[in-house]
Amino acid sequence: MRIISGKYKGRRLTAPKKLPVRPTTDMAKEALFNILNNHFNFSELKILEIFAGTGNISYEFASRGSAPITCVDADYGCVAYIKKTAAEFDFDITAIKSDAFLFLERCKSSFDIIFADPPYGLTQQQFENISTLVFENNLLDEEGMLIIEHSKETKLEKMPNFSYAKNYGGTTFSFFEFETKDEETE
């Protein structure tokens, strides 16, 4: 995996092979950040990455100036790797070992962007529960965005606050945002 843009553009990162991860491909990550670049000034963003794995997406945000960043993963090895990499690059990233669903239930902070890259093998209900917990617990700022990465087989279009989805190879990004007043009156 590599950092696509920002201060550390082109830097390669090699995670230990024993980690239980499926990092977002460079092609999909580049496409995602091209979309986000049209919506946000990265230097002003507070980020939450759940099911963080290697922290791949968080490093991209950090390289572009986003801070603070919180990474949540249930695997001790993943959390240790994120902490080590964040220290190495001097990124403002806090890594927390926790079940992502429990974290979303208990979290009292809000974020500009929440990125979730759960295992593709979760059930449809578990994928839907991510969005439900984020919006019910007010974890997203009013102008914020929730992005859930999933396989093409998972369908999230009927969920409240769903905005749109983009496919890149076998990867789909579903975007969720608060409805604006203009959309509600149409």
Image (cartoon, rainbow, N blue to C red):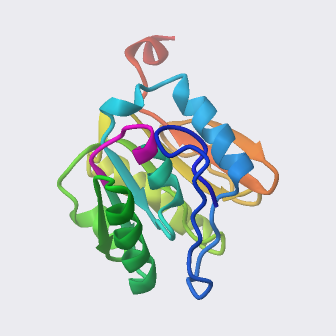
User: Can see residue 68?
Assistant: yes
Asked if residue 170 is positioned above or below residue 106 in the image, the reply reads: above
114 vs 22, left or right, is: left
The answer to which of 10 and 18 lies nearer the viewer is 10
In percent of the image, x 64 and y 59: which residue is there?
Answer: 24
The answer to if 41 sits in the magenta stretch is no
User: Can see residue 143?
Assistant: no
Q: Position of residue 34 (x, y in %)?
A: 62, 31
74 vs 19, left or right, is: left
The span picked out in magenta is 62-69
123 vs 143, left or right, is: right
Which SS type dominates the magenta stretch?
loop
In percent of the image, x 34 and y 70: which residue is there?
Answer: 83
Q: Position of residue 135 (x, y in %)?
A: 35, 46
Classify residue 30 by image quadrant: top right
In percent of the image, x 50 and y 37: which residue is there?
Answer: 6
Name the image quarter holding the N terminus. bottom right
